[in-house]
Image (spheres, helix red, strand yellow):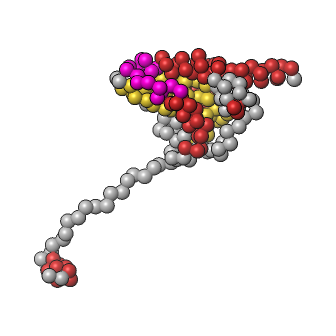
Amino acid sequence: MSRRRVTRLMRVQRLQGVHRRRWRGPGVRDVATWPDHVNRRFVADRPDRLWVTDITQHRTGCGWVYCAVVLDVYSRRVVGWSIADHLRTELVVDALEMARMHRKPVGTVVHSDRGTQYTSWLFGNRLREAGLLGSMGRIASCYDNALMESFFGSMQIELLDRRDWPTQDDLAKAIFEWIEAWYNPHRRHSALGYLSPAEYETLHAATSTAA
């Protein structure tokens, strides 16, 4: 039976074929409230001029651990961090509040991706209250926050993938020690003339005082 005959008979009998509807995803909504003030230029001429921030996650034997970090672009220093077993907006707000408490920034640009935590009203409101300027890269573009990707890559190689982590508490303590006892005071960076972030900031302070 030809296709045309089937079409005619179905029309006479008022029949209609059943088929799957084409699925259309909701798409990615652009809800960011900040333009990109960085444009992949991760440079700063002094501390607290530009911060970058993001979240990483790692599995343990008892569940996931999530870590939000705020990094100073000038010295590569971790100026704020937060560790939790959830991905709620409070995770990134706590990291930002630690950075604010330690550094007392004025007019600092805070650059992130467009994750829901960073596009939330709470995070944006904290930026505005503190007089900080938000900045966001494009959707699904890791290069727009490449400095944070590099930092988390180092954390993964030097800490996270070195062993299995039985509990969330074990990993949280290890991340704390890696950041505060190793990365900030001792880990050398070629971009900093093979100084650690803390040493580089000390050198900047001494140079500024002399000038």
Q: Residue drawn at (61%, 25%), measured in percent from left and top?
A: 78
Give the quarter of the figure containing the N terminus. Answer: bottom left
Extreme-front residue of the structure = 162
Residue 26 picture location, percent across and down: 39, 52
**What is the count of numbered marks?**
0
Residue 12 x, y percent position in the rendering: 14, 80
Instruction: Check if residue 141 falls in the magenta segment.
Output: no
- The magenta segment is 158-172
Q: Position of residue 50 (x, y in %)?
A: 67, 33
Using the image as rendered, state which of residue 129 and residue 64 is in the foreground: 64
Magenta-drawn stretch, dominant element (helix, strand or loop): helix
In the drawing, does residue 74 fall left or right of residue 122?
Answer: right
Residue 41 visible (yes or no):
yes
Give the residue displayed 57% in from the left and 26% down from the top: 96
Left or right of 10, for residue 128: right
Q: Position of residue 25 (x, y in %)?
A: 37, 53
On the question of residue 85 being in view, the answer is no
Task: Classify 17 as above or below 74.
Answer: below
The quarter of the picture where residue 190 lies is top right
Image point (59%, 28%), residue name: 70
Residue at image position (64%, 20%) is 186
Res 60 → quadrant = top left
Q: Which residue is at the front of the view, 175 or 51?
A: 175
Relative to 150, is 97 above or below? above
Q: Is residue 22 left or right of residue 134?
A: left
* Quadrant of res 86: top left
Q: Is residue 77 above or below residue 34?
A: above
